[in-house]
Image (spheres, rainbow, N blue to C red):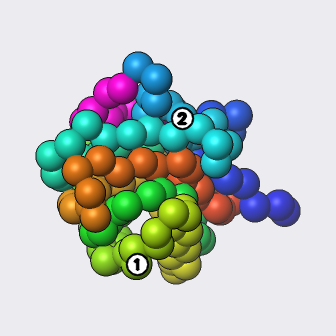
């Protein structure tokens, strides 16, 4: 059985919420599978976005490609709707001048229907998120 990246729109992922909107860099870019497109925040923190999966999935690793993010929190929900989130990870990221931050978070296999990414602070007024990944398997029914 092959692992799936559940955070791809081609895998059925959908962006269900984003706290800021920029017409040239929409939040849907984080699930398009490309590091060349991105979502940009519009100042003020925290900023967040929620990715919904087509079903409850088992995830073993979450990764993010971003720029100028200082503190990131990742939460999950197993509810039918994007509610009742619980914190999985909170981490201060290293500043990488002029290049993307690439962070991977290995996780014990856990279930999720939604992942919420909360950018609590940044190294600048604006940050960008280029791609998120959630590697795992479809849950056995």
Q: Is residue 7 left or right of residue 19?
A: right
Q: Across the whole image, how many numbered discs are drawn on residues? A: 2
What's the residue at 39%, 32% (across, down)? 16
Q: Which residues are magenta?
A: 15-22
Q: Is residue 31 above or below residue 128?
A: above
Q: Is residue 25 left or right of residue 9?
A: left
Toward the right, the furthest residue is: 1
What's the residue at 23%, 50% (across, down)? 125
Residue 8 within the segment the image draws in magenta: no
Q: Position of residue 42 (x, y in %)?
A: 25, 37
Quadrant location, the N terminus: bottom right
Q: Which residue is mark 2?
A: 29
What's the residue at 67%, 53% (across, down)? 5
Q: Position of residue 6 (x, y in %)?
A: 62, 49
Q: Position of residue 75 (x, y in %)?
A: 33, 60
Q: Nearer the viewer, residue 110 or 71?
A: 71
Q: Which residue is mark 1?
A: 94
């Amino acid at each position: 059985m092959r692992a799936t990246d559940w955070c791809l729109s081609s895998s059925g992922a959908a962006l269900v919420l984003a706290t800021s909107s920029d017409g040239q860099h929409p939040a849907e870019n984080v699930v398009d599978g490309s590091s060349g497109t991105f979502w940009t925040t519009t100042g003020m923190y925290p900023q967040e976005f929620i990715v919904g999966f087509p079903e409850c999935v088992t995830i073993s690793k979450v990764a993010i490609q971003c720029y100028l993010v200082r503190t990131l929190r990742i939460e999950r929900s197993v509810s039918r709707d994007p509610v009742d989130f619980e914190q999985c990870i909170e981490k201060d990221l290293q500043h990488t001048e002029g290049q993307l931050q690439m962070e991977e978070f290995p996780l014990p296999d856990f279930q999720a229907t939604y992942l919420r990414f909360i950018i609590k602070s940044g190294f600048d007024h604006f940050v960008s998120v280029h791609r998120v990944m959630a590697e795992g398997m479809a849950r056995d029914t």
